[in-house]
Image (cartoon, helix red, strand yellow):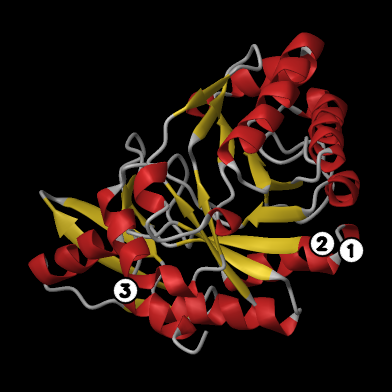
Amino acid sequence: MELLVFHLPYNRAGLEVIKKYYSIFDKLIPAWLGAAADGSIRIHDDAGTIHQYMNKKKIIPMVQNLELSSRVSNSLVKDKEAVNRFTADSLAYLKKRGYEELCLDIEGVKYENRESYTDFIGRVAENLHGAGFHLSICIPAKTGNSKDSTWSGAYDYNKLGKIADRIIIMAYDFHWPGGPPGPIAPINWLQDVIDYAIMEIPLEKIYFALGLYGYDWPLKQEERGRGLVYRQIAELAGRYKKEIEWDQESRCPYMKYEVNGVEHEVWFENRCSIESKLRLLQDFQLKGVVFWRPGQEDPEVWELFKDK
């Protein structure tokens, strides 16, 4: 199974992990590019540093809609002039910089723009393929083709699976900061996402993106959860003298603590939960795993790949 990782430019913790473990990464996907509503591309990269460890054949620059704004993504995919500009500029970027593949992470597309998004991906793919380049896309996890989902409904697994070379399914945030506490990627949900994906997308194109972070929810209705990295969770456990517990149903770790009279519930990923997920992906002979993202993780996660 291939091992890919995302990277945020100039993220110090992430860079330290890349420096230490770059030899086990098959590909690095750095979020270096931002797409504006008019199709123009903004570049913000740490390529000089990354190239010290990863050669260009192992780097897939990623384009995200600026600020992951739904307004930007929906404007972009509907505007023919913007699509033309983006298509031309993305190809020019690859040619100039010497990379072989582009990754698109265009999030927040509304169901009403489903066809426009699919056409947009088709246009970009046609342009890149015609010049000898490859295209990866990141799409939300889902368990069916429901138009009611505001997060994932616009992403047509079947059609996209015929267009892109690599499909990265973002299998995290089943529970998210704006909702109730719970596992970020429970194993039974992951199983359901896989079951649906393999019916719609060629097996050799499927990669699953797994999160390495956690969320801390205060159990007060008016307050949102907050994101934490593994190091912060370990510090909380030590400070409040709490044991890490294990939820067998979801196969995820969690912890509860109280501060200033407010109870908190923390759910996250560690070596054990990631190992369970990797076994499941391997059982289905999926092409690879992609981690969001180095610098957030239980350091023991990398021990799972020591034989690569």
Judge by depth and name the residue closer to the eye, 89 or 63. Answer: 89
Which label sits on residue 161?
A: none
Label 3: which residue? 299
The 10 Å Cα crowd at callout 3, few under 14, some 14 to 19, many 20 or more, is some
Residue 246 in view in this figure: no
The x and y percentages for residue 305 are 48, 82
Q: Earlier in the sequence, mark 2 or mark 3?
A: 2
Residue 112 in view in this figure: yes
For the residue labelled by badge 2, is the local secondary structure a helix, a strand or a loop?
A: helix
Q: Is the residue 218 above or below the residue 120 in the image? A: below
For the residue labelled by badge 3, is the local secondary structure a helix, a strand or a loop?
A: helix
Label 2: which residue? 196
Judge by depth and name the residue closer to the eye, 69 or 95. Answer: 95
Q: Disc 3 or disc 1, which is closer to the eye?
A: 3
Per the model, the C-alpha gap separating discs 3 and 1 is: 34 Å
Give the left or right position of residue 160, taking residue 139 as reference.
Answer: right
The x and y percentages for residue 181 are 42, 54
- Whether label 1 touches label 2, CB < 8 Å: yes
For the residue labelled by badge 1, is the local secondary structure a helix, a strand or a loop?
A: helix
The x and y percentages for residue 145 are 84, 47
Residue at figure coordinates x 42%, y 43% from the top left: 47
Label 1: which residue? 199
- Whether label 2 touches label 3, CB < 8 Å: no
